[in-house]
Amino acid sequence: MPEGDRRVALLDARLDNPQPNFITIADKYQGAKLNSPNDAVINSQGDIFFTDPPYGLPREADRELPFHGVYKVSDGQISFITDSVTCL
């Protein structure tokens, strides 16, 4: 994915012949672009959890969300979990 793409995506390609074909899983929350989605994990039910930390954007003015948090994607729906994220 290009740097600054601001989304969580699935690489839809064979491992022996990867091509840049990405399927967006999450790129917005309540109509606003994510900041810098990072650190994804998937639980046994297939839910995806990821952080959206403050680093990664070239300018603070590029932020559309006023907070940094943790999100969950389940059945194609994105949910906000918490904004109590401390980044060092």
Image (cartoon, rainbow, N blue to C red):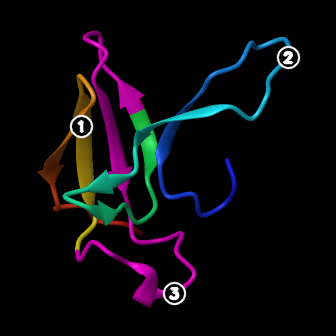
Spatial separation of the CA atoms under disc 1 and disc 3: 26 Å
Q: Which residue is mark 2?
A: 17
The answer to whether residue 44 is magenta is yes
Which of the pair 86/10 is nearer the observer? 10
As displayed, is residue 48 above or below residue 86?
above
Marks 2 and 1, the one that precedes in the sequence: 2
Q: Residue at x 37, y 61 (%)?
A: 34
For the stretch drawn in magenta, the main secondary structure is loop
Numbered mark located on residue 59 in the image? 3
Numbered mark located on residue 72 in the image? 1
Q: Residues within 10 Å of mark 2 (few under 14, many from 20)?
A: few
Q: Residue at x 45, y 82 (%)?
A: 62
65 relative to 42 in the view: left or right:
left
As displayed, is residue 2 above or below residue 13?
below
What is the x, y in percent for residue 5?
A: 57, 57
Q: Residue at x 49, y 58 (%)?
A: 6
The answer to whether residue 70 is magenta is no
The nearer-to-camera label among 2 and 1 is 2
What is the x, y in percent for residue 63?
A: 38, 78
Marks 2 and 3, the one that precedes in the sequence: 2
Q: Type of residue at label 1?
A: Lys
Q: Residues within 10 Å of mark 1 (few under 14, many from 20)?
A: many
54 relative to 18 in the view: left or right:
left
Q: Secondary structure at mark 2?
A: loop
Which residues make up the magenta segment? 41-66
Q: Are marks 2 and 1 in contact (CB under 8 Å)?
A: no
What is the x, y in percent for residue 60?
A: 43, 87
How many numbered circles are shown? 3
Marks 1 and 3, the one that precedes in the sequence: 3
